[in-house]
């Protein structure tokens, strides 16, 4: 049995968060390092990905400073708009918001510097 198959027996299919205590128990049970555990979780997420539109399955995993682990994967649904136009519009909106925030920060720093002189 592979480590991924063993991991699947230890984690329920709907699990997306693993506490530090659970992670310690799993890594000891599987006799793997934290890095190996993170890679296995990403592969576990990949197995749960659902991509009927693009056919591009993505799995990911992250660990917090506190030692909690999170599993991620993409999920596409037929009928939801997924086009280049929609994606570009969202990217443009986010970029404009970030630029506006940056401009406000620059103005605040400039005002702080003027009042110090």
Image (tube, rainbow, N blue to C red):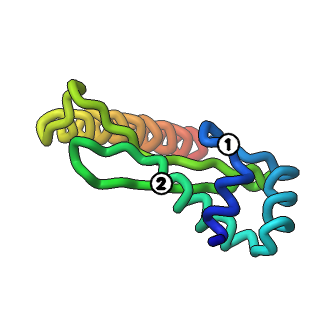
Residue 97, located in which quarter of the rendered image?
A: top left
Mark 2 vs 1: CB contact within 8 A = no
Q: Residue at x 70, y 53 (%)?
A: 9
Q: Nearer the viewer, residue 63 or 9?
A: 9
The disc placed on residue 68 is none
Q: Indicate the position of residue 72 as horizontal and vertical percent values.
A: 52, 47
| Residue where numbered disc 2 is placed | 47
Residue in the picture at 69% in, 52% down:
69
Residue 39: image quadrant is bottom right
Label 1: element kind:
loop
Disc nearer the start of the sequence (2/1): 1
Front in this rendered view, residue 100 or 53 = 53
Q: Specify whether 22 is left or right of 36.
A: right
Residue assigned mark 1: 12
Residue 88: horizontal and vertical position, in percent? 18, 40
Query: Extreme left residue here?
Result: 85
Q: Does dot 2 land on a helix, a strand or a loop?
A: helix
Per the model, the C-alpha gap separating discs 2 and 1 is 13 Å
Residue 28 against residue 86 in the figure, above or below? below
Image height check: is 38 above or below 86? below
């Amino acid at each position: 049995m592979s480590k991924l198959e063993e991991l699947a027996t230890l984690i329920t299919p709907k699990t997306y968060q693993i506490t530090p205590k659970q992670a310690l128990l799993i890594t000891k049970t599987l006799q793997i390092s934290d890095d190996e555990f993170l890679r296995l979780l990403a592969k576990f997420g990949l197995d749960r990905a659902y991509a009927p539109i693009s056919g591009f399955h993505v799995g990911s995993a992250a660990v917090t400073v506190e030692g909690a682990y999170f599993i991620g994967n993409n999920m596409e649904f037929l009928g939801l708009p997924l086009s280049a136009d929609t994606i570009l519009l969202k990217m443009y909106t986010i970029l404009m918001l970030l630029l506006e925030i940056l401009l406000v920060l620059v103005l605040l720093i400039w005002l702080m510097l003027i009042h110090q002189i």
